[in-house]
Image: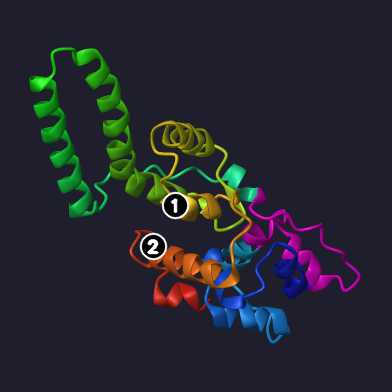
Amino acid sequence: MVREARMSVGFTNREDFAEACNISVRVLADFEAGKRTNFSERVLSRLEAGLGWPPGTVDQAVFDENFVPPKSVAGGNLLFRPPAFDRQPVQVEVVTVEKTISLLTEISRERAASKSKVATDAEAVTRLGAAAIALCWPYVIRLVEDNCLPGNELHPSVRPVYEAFLAVQTEFAPDDNSGRYARWLAGDESDVPDPVRRRYMERWSESRRVRPGRRSASEADD
């Protein structure tokens, strides 16, 4: 039952789903195989959230063999989770910073040499906009990573921020492909080859390992 529900929300890989739910692969395997029923409430609630099931659904399924669970809705319970807005610094590529400084220097020289600064300034805004987009992506990506069920749904409180940034990116840096990963995380990029999807999932999983609040070794094996 759980395996079918997992597949129905797009998680064909058990490891990916376990990581998305923040439970161990062994616990998920035991659950799907029906090897035991003594799982903690923490594990049950995370599993239900990952499948989009209402709280208490798993208990009903365990004690009533005729129970038919509701249709799984990927990320349905994101609505009831507080969004994560991490204000701590993010890592920025030094090369990106260096390119931005070089661009500012170049624009400054062009302004000094130009008799008519209006045209120069209009072009400068576009060029600086593209540079600023590159500097902003690390924060936007982390925001999406912290508030999504990867490949399925983005927290509704975070989506307006994400979409506002995409609109600006489209205007100033339409050829910037940095955001494909973020769009996939948010469920907005479905046409992704399987090898790329696996790399994206590995990248998201790695981001979970370095973020605070992830499961401890003991929690993973509840």
Q: Is residue 35 left or right of residue 175?
A: right
Q: Nearer the viewer, residue 181 or 170?
A: 170
Q: Residues within 10 Å of mark 2 (few under 14, many from 20)?
A: few
Q: Quadrant of residue 53?
A: bottom right
- Mark 1: amino acid: Asp
Q: Residue at x 82, y 57 (%)?
A: 70
Which residue is under mark 2? 207
Q: In the rendered image of this protein, does residue 48 appear above or below residue 160?
A: below
Instruction: Answer with mark 1 or mark 2, whichever residue precedes in sequence.
Output: 1
- The secondary structure type at the circle numbered 1 is helix
Q: Is residue 72 magenta?
A: yes
Location of residue 93 in the rendering, given as x and y in whole percent from the top left corner: 23, 54
Q: Is residue 131 left or right of residue 140?
A: left
Q: Looking at the figure, which quarter contains the N terminus? A: bottom right
- Measured in 3D between alpha carbons, the distance from the residue under mark 1 to the one under mark 2, in whole angstroms, is 9 Å
The part of the chain drawn in magenta is: 48-76
Location of residue 138 in the rendering, given as x and y in whole percent from the top left corner: 33, 49
Q: Is residue 212 magenta?
A: no
Location of residue 27 in the rendering, given as x and y in whole percent from the top left corner: 58, 79
Q: Residue at x 28, y 43 (%)?
A: 135
Which residue is under mark 1? 146
- Mark 2: amino acid: Ser
Q: Is residue 203 left or right of residue 128?
A: right
Q: Residue at x 45, y 67 (%)?
A: 205
Q: Residues within 10 Å of mark 1 (few under 14, many from 20)?
A: many
Location of residue 7 in the rendering, given as x and y in whole percent from the top left corner: 72, 69
Q: Quadrant of residue 121?
A: top left
